[in-house]
Image (cartoon, rainbow, N blue to C red):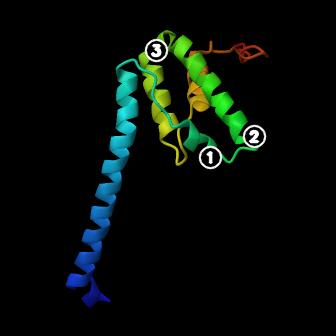
């Protein structure tokens, strides 16, 4: 076992793994970096709606999925300037970091949650203990 660890074959395997990880990281940065950069420039990112609807695993039909994605994109187009840049960048990172294809419905939901007023507890605050 120790001989294997110090053999040239172990070094070749480790080098191969490192190269594969480097290539994968480069591809991810290229794909997701462009989406994050578009947020920094104030533009709505361009997602592949077809890929999002194919890989969604949703119960809805692909046609309904496409309709929902287009409606979310249209709403984002109307409201995009109202969202804070920091929220947009954060939501794009969240939306594009998943294993599946990024989609507009998730991006819109994230941005709406980020801009929603903070709700107070419906039961009131915690009771103050009298001293």
| Mark 2 surroundings: few (<14), some (14-19) or many (≥20) residues within 10 A | few
**Residue topped by disc 2:** 60
Residue in the picture at 27% in, 80% down: 10
Give how far apart the Cα atoms at labels 1 and 3 are: 31 Å
Observer-nearest of 126 and 115: 115
Kindly identify which numbered label has been placed on residue 66: none
Observer-nearest of 102 and 130: 102
**Residue topped by disc 1:** 54
Q: Earlier in the sequence, mark 1 or mark 3?
A: 1
Does 101 appear above or below 15? above
Observer-nearest of 117 and 98: 98
94 horizontally vs 35: left or right = right
**Residue topped by disc 3:** 84
Q: Earlier in the sequence, mark 3 or mark 2?
A: 2
Counting from the top left corner in percent of width and height, residue 23 is at: 30, 56
Tag 3 secondary structure = loop
Counting from the top left corner in percent of width and height, residue 120 is at: 69, 14
**Nearer the camera: disc 3 or disc 2:** 2
Counting from the top left corner in percent of width and height, residue 113 is at: 61, 22
Does 1 appear above or below 121? below
Tag 2 secondary structure = loop
Residue in the picture at 68% in, 35% down: 65
Point out the residue furthest to the right here.
123
């Amino acid at each position: 076992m120790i001989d294997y660890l110090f053999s040239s074959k172990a070094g070749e395997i480790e080098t191969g793994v490192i190269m594969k990880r480097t290539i994968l990281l480069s591809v991810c940065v290229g794909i997701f970096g462009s989406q994050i950069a578009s947020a920094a420039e104030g533009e709505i990112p361009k997602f592949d709606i077809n890929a999002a609807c194919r890989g969604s695993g949703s119960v809805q039909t692909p046609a309904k999925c496409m309709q929902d994605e287009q409606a979310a994109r249209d709403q984002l187009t109307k409201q995009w300037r109202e969202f804070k840049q920091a929220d947009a960048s954060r939501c794009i990172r969240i939306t594009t970091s998943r294993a599946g294809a990024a989609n507009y419905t998730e991006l819109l939901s994230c941005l709406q949650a980020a801009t929603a007023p903070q709700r107070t507890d419906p039961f009131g605050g915690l009771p103050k203990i009298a001293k």
